[in-house]
Amino acid sequence: MTVSQRSDYTFKYNKQHGRHGWLRLTPAYSVKMVNEIIGSVPKDAFILDPFSGTATTGLVAAEHGLSAHCLDINRFLIWMGNLKCRNYSSTEIDHLRRGFSAASANSRNLVHEDNWVPELHNINRWWCLRTLRILAALRQALVNEFGEPRNRDGHGLIWIAFCRLIIETSSAAFNHVSMSFRDSVPTFELDEIFSLFEHIFSAIIDSSQGELPGCASVHHVDSREEISIGEVKYSHIVTSPPYPNRISYIRELRPYMYWTKFLDSAREAGELDWQAIGGTWGVATSRLQQWEPIEIELPPALNDVVEEIMATEEKNAHLMASYVLKYFHDMHLHLQSLRGSLRKGAVLTYIVGNSSFYGVQVRTDRLLEESMRILGYSNVGSRIVRKRNSKKELFEYCTYATWQEIGTYEPLYFSENQHQPEQLGLLA
């Protein structure tokens, strides 16, 4: 039985959908997928996304007139997510337009000055010196007009536009599963950059107008810890946690975070990846060598997978085995701490991907199902959503469960790809 890759169920679908397309992030899941999930949710639902990322879940919930809380540990993503999920008054928009015009004009006078640039490693791989000077002058003019990004949320749209500008004038390429670099660094003239910035700013302003009928907000919370935001009990969990595939989620965010001063050093990037479930950047990798799990009941199948990876005797087998163990250990802690925040009968929907290490299959869907059953969830199951790429064994799944519910629940979405794993010979 064939399962298609379904590019409309990936971040690629988001690019042309208003606020969802403000900034590109490969791990973001499809707004179409979230619409299919949330479309069947009752209007009195209160949704939680414990892995907010680009706030796709929160924004879709707000578009549907629902309430949602989203959680993340990355303060840049929290800042951006709250900008995406709020309403903007005509007064704010007019003020931004006037400020944009003033800053654009003033920046021309700053091009030949020694303006601040971020300490991004090998920055000349991203931008040529000429482009860098123009971007630095433009940034300083925006600071003079609006203040630093993280200090003035009301002016955030101008900084979202600037983030989009820096990536579109860079050598970053997105023809792989994560970000890479083009063979040569592009060169832009002053007027080209200003014209592009105006185009980006206008598109973001246009997409920000129109009232969101619901209410969503993003909060700084570690998903492994108990949640206490106004003592809300959630009826639906709609999320896509990081996958256990050793792709750093900080990688694509680094240029945005450095330019907006949410990040100052590579060390900080590594610390953030260490805090994240599945993080692998810098210090996060080295700390895996000494990491030990706490005493909790983990899925028995996890031990088998870890031992299989170790048995390959590959150079980094011990490191990869520790990585897989820590990932599912942390996800188990998350599912454990989540229970106190759920209404009776709450529905959980997790979009997850499986992995392979040295030929050893890591079935994320099955391991999370086991964790859910150990922790007392019911009606646990998974369905394949799509094929992820050319590797025949990699799929994306919808793993679902309910909390303290006796009845039977199965998802009504993803009807085109509702194949059970055994139908594809994946359980052998």
Image (cartoon, rainbow, N blue to C red):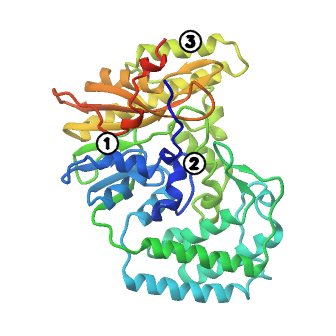
- Residue type, numbered disc 2: Thr
- Which residue sits at x=57%, y=27%? 323
Which quadrant of the figure has residue 413?
A: top left
Which structural element holds mark 1? strand
* Sequence-earlier tag: 3 or 1: 1
Q: Residue 237 carries which label?
A: 1
What kind of element bears circle 2? Answer: loop
Q: Is residue 352 above or below residue 181?
A: above
Q: Where is residue 312 in the image (x, y as percent from the top left)?
A: 66, 12
Sequence-first tag of 3 and 2: 2
Disc 3 designates what residue?
307
According to the picture, the residue beneath numbered tag 2 turns out to be: 26
Relative to 262, 358 lies left or right: right
Q: Residues within 10 Å of mark 3 (few under 14, many from 20)?
A: some
Q: Which of 147 and 26 is in front in this view?
A: 26
Label whose residue precedes the other's in the sequence (1 or 2): 2
Seen in the picture, residue 335 relative to 177 is either above or below; the reply is above
Separation of marks 3 and 2 at Cα, in angstroms: 31 Å
Q: Position of residue 184 (x, y in %)?
A: 83, 57
